[in-house]
Amino acid sequence: MFLFLNFTCQIQVGGKDQSGNPDFQIYVVFLFFAFWNTILALFLPVSLLGDELENKTYIPILSRPVSSLTYIGGKSLGVLLLVFANGVFLIGTYFVKQWIGGEVFSWDLLKACFTMFSVFYFLILFGFVSVLSFGKNAAFFGGLALLVFSTFLDLFIYESVAANMIQTSDLKKQVLEAIYWILPQEGTVFFFSSSLLAKSLSQVHYYGEYSLIQIGIWIVLCFGFVKVVLDRKEL
């Protein structure tokens, strides 16, 4: 908490103090929120379900009249509540800091953070699917790799500077663009969320609304994948 408060009070870029720049300061707070909760969304489901699979503690639960979807739904919502509680703590800490300093609290920060929970919930469900299919280590690094790759594709598709750095043929660009529209657009949701609160720092318009719908479809697909995997395991 003290590190978070100190970081938001003293921000320098290029040797210049940015603590007085409201857009930059609020953007850094959002970055801290997104980064820390993303780590939790990647780690918690892997740790929770991985331990249950190794210790066989899920058997007594599923031996009762509890469906596989109910089991995973309850677990995933429990993890999401933990992530939500952490987010409330971080934003609440920043709110108290602003209130003590007599500064205005940006309500756009709440909008940006709220839209990120679709990504957090997808990562939680993806973690459960990956743990059931491939194990704990593969689940964590697989979720992280998917997050990084989808963000890279977002930059490649929408940022001309980033696209020009990579020399690719038209066919490869079309393939990458097709992959972008198929994979969960976690990076696009992040950039869309950040543009809600720091418009001066975001110069590209992203299809955020579409990406939120697409992430929602992937969440439904993850529930389907979980059911298929658990049915094959005959739990």
Image: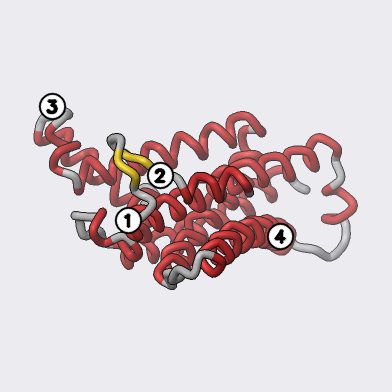
Instruction: Report how many numbered discs are placed on residues in the image.
Output: 4
Would residue 213 appear left or right of 124 to someone viewing this image? left
Label 2 environment density (alpha carbons within 10 Å; few <14, some 14–19, many ≥20): some
Q: Three-letter amino acid code at disc 2?
A: Ile
- In this view, the mark in front (2 or 3): 2
**Which residue type does callout 4 highlight?**
Gly
* Mark 4 Cα-neighbour bin, 10 Å: few <14, some 14–19, many ≥20: few
Dot 4 corresponds to which residue?
Answer: 78
Q: Seen from this angle, which residue lies furthest front? A: 101
Q: Residue at x 19, y 45 (%)?
A: 159
Report how far apart the C-alphas of labels 3 and 4 lie in the structure: 45 Å
Residue receiving disc 1: 21
- Residue 190 seen by the camera: no
Q: Do the CB atoms of the residues marked 1 and 2 lie less than 8 Å apart?
A: yes
Q: Which residue is mark 3?
A: 167
Q: Which mark is residue 190?
A: none
Q: Which residue is mark 2?
A: 11
Q: Amino acid at mark 1?
A: Asn
N-terminal of the pair, mark 1 or mark 2, is 2
First along the sequence among labels 4 and 2: 2
